[in-house]
Each structure stands twice: as structure tokens, then as C-alpha cells.
Image (cartoon, grey):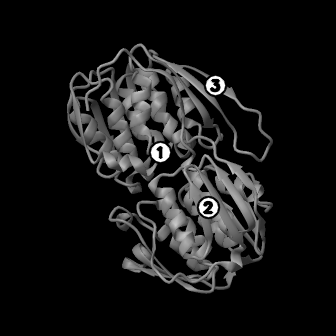
Amino acid sequence: MDFIHNGLSGEIHIPGDKSISHRSIMFGSIAEGKTVVKNFLAGEDCLSTIACFKKLGVKIEREDQTVIIHGKGMDALKEPEEVLDVGNSGTTIRLIMGILSGRPFHSVLIGDSSIGKRPMTRVVGPLKEMGAKIEGRQSGEFTPLSVTGGELESITYTLPVASAQVKSAIILAGLQAKGTTKIIEPEKTRDHTERMIHAFGGKVTNDNGTISVEGGQSFKATNLIVPGDISSAAFFLAAGAIVPNSKIALKNVGLNPTRTGIIDVLQEMGAKMTIQPYERNGQEEPAGDIMIETSELKGVTIGGEMIPRLIDEIPIIALLSTQATGKTIIKDAQELKVKETNRIDTVVNELKKLGANIEATDDGMIIEGQTSLSGGSVQSYGDHRIGMMLSIASLISDGAIELYQPDAIAVSYPSFFDHIDHLLK
């Protein structure tokens, strides 16, 4: 991959948010009535969620970025005749476990080789505590997973690690349990599940980090417009800031405050950026347009409660940091070790191949900038965010970058390379 250009210019519409797209299918499937979802992300991960719910007996129609879900309520879900294959989607497997835990039938969950290496105990543990029967390799640590649901009891559970996926799985089980389920978060995580419950007419509360949900709720169908995924926008925000002579506009970007850590980091680094939020009511997902241009950046320290708000953006922040003056320290990011790859080691190893001055630590990385990047052969390891980060690196490298396994990018951003081409013209 070798781009010769005079900077990036123009505007692009960011594809729908992956987290919200997943949840729109799940809640549309357990609601009663016809739910219409627009700007749905038709990436492989979200299509895996659709495939799973079709196997659970839900009628779902899709045409490009519009999805129509004919829900008949939670009780209408049927025992699947086939194994539920989540592909590469950690969100699908962890959240659907919460739903299946309360259903009176048996299901088997599998995924690709990457999913087979990702730990599931943190979800399986609390769901078993509520009464679900879940078995898998190494005591339920790894797929394939066998889930036999039934009557669930409510629990009060303190998350050992801030995780929106674990929280959401427990909430989805709690909606089917007797009594009130409470989840205590060590740090605030993305709240798309809670907003989705409100959108479908349900109730969930958050009292200073304690999330409470009553069992036995039912949901009514609604219409949704999915905002653009800020985790996808992050790659072009970075490109706009570090590619010389660039000025770009990103349209309809989700601005949920639990997800905007990347914006805070860019502002702290000194990026030239303006944000125009759209008018929204309190329950809707906030969104807006972001303009960014080539900037002189400085190194920063990132850690603590900021990490859950930008965990998926750390690979691109590492690249940003190679072009910033001074040292950037990323800490408290142990969660990166259990993503699609061990993202700490992968980011460090691949950027080192391009000449970056970067070192791994137990919980993050240290990057010394400003460094010119050279060309070379790099690998996504099947991780979409690593693939996109390395593709953006090719826009500023002195030589050509050859990326192996670029197809992984289609998991979350099928139009990624088209959007690069558009901004280069």
C-alpha cells in the first residue's frame, strides 16, 4: 500500500456504530412489533448477530443499511436447530449469552479461531450465579459454549474489570430474572445497552455507578437511526491530524460521552478540531459533525477512568503518538490483552517494524515522538483495528507498506478503503 498525495480533503459519512447496530438487532428481536433500523453497520460482526437471531426464529429483513426486525417478544425466541456462529464478534457472543441464559432451551455458541482464544469466564461466572447452565472448554473459559437457560435469580454483582460487554450480558439476563439485578461498575463504561432499553420502552437506572434493572420487562418496537461509529471515525480523525496538508469533515459521528475519550485525547494533544453537535432529546444517542485538520501534536499521559472511554482507539492513538512531540504514556490498559489480538504486543511489534520508537509495558505502552515512519511488511493478525491503524500509517510513511490480511477491516468498516480513496482525490 503506497499513497502519493497532497493531503486529505473532503467529507465522509462514517458507517453506523457497531455497538449500537448489534444492540438494535437484539432489542428489536425481543421487542413486540416491527422495528426499523437505519444506518445499520452491515459489517461482518453485525451480520453475525442477524444470523444468530434468525436461527432463534426471528424474521429479519435487510437492504443495504436498513434492517427491519419483526419481533414477537422475548418468549417467542425458539431453540435453534443449528449451532449459533458468532464469527469474529465478541459483542455478539457475550451479549447473546445474557439473553439465552433466561430462555428455557439449549443453545451452542461457536466463533472463529480468534473468538476461540478470548476468555468468556467473566461473563459465564455471573450468568451461572444467576442460574444459567453454561459449559465449555476449560470450565467455560473458551468456546464452544453450551447454554441451557431457564428461571434466573437476580444478583448484585460488582464488575472486577470495567467492561460494557459483561455489564450488558448481566443486564440482558437481569431483564428475565426474578427481582432486581444490580451491577456495580468500577468505572463508567459505554451505556448503549441502557439507552437502548429506554428507546424500546423499558426501564433501567444508574445511581452513582450502580445499575439496576427489574426482571419481567417487555419491550415495544421502535424506529432507530444509528449514529456513525466514533471508533471508526477515530482512524480518520488521526489521519486528518497527522497527514500533511489535510482538512476533512466527518459527518454523523456518535458523540456518546462514554465513547468520546479519543476526542479528549486529540484536544489534549493540541489537534485543530471543531465539533458541531446535533440537537437530541435526553434518551437518544448524541451525534454531530467533526472537522479536523493537520496539527502540531504533543505527547500526553493516558490512564485511569479515561481508558474505558477509548479502549478500542488505543491502536490509532499509538500511531498518533509517533507523530507527536515528546513522550506519550498509555497505562491501565490491560484489557487490550484480551481483544481480537493481544493489542499491546501487536501494536508495538507492528509499529516497530515501521521504525516507531515504542515499547510495551505490562498495562500499556510508551511512545517517543516525533518519528518518521518507514515502509515495510506488516500484519493485521485478523484484527480490524490493527489493520486500519497500519493503513493510516501508510499515508505518512516514507516508503510503501504492505499489509497482510487487510480483509479483517471489513468486520467493522467495509467502506474503509473507499473512504481513503475519496479523501485523496
Q: Which residue is mark 3?
A: 275
In whole angstroms, how far apart are the C-alphas of marks 3 and 2? 29 Å
Expressed as whole percent of the image width and height from the top left, the position of residue 6 reads 36, 14
Classify residue 369 by image quadrant.
top left
Name the residue beneath numbered marker 1: 312
Of residues 360 and 108, the one drawn nearer to the viewer in this rendering: 108
Q: Is residue 106 visible?
A: yes
Q: In the figure, is residue 388 to the left or right of 151?
A: left
Do residues under tags 1 and 3 come within 8 Å of each other at their CB atoms?
no
State which tag comes first along the sequence, 1 or 2: 2
Badge 1 or badge 3: first in the primary sequence: 3
Neighbourhood count class around disc 2 (C-alpha, 10 Å): few under 14, some 14–19, many 20 upward: many
Amino acid found under the numbered disc labelled 3: Ile
Residue 299 shows in this picture = no
Using a 10 Å C-alpha cutoff, classify the residue at mark 3 as few (fewer than 14 neighbours), some (14 to 19) or many (20 or more). Answer: some
Q: What residue does disc 2 label?
A: 25
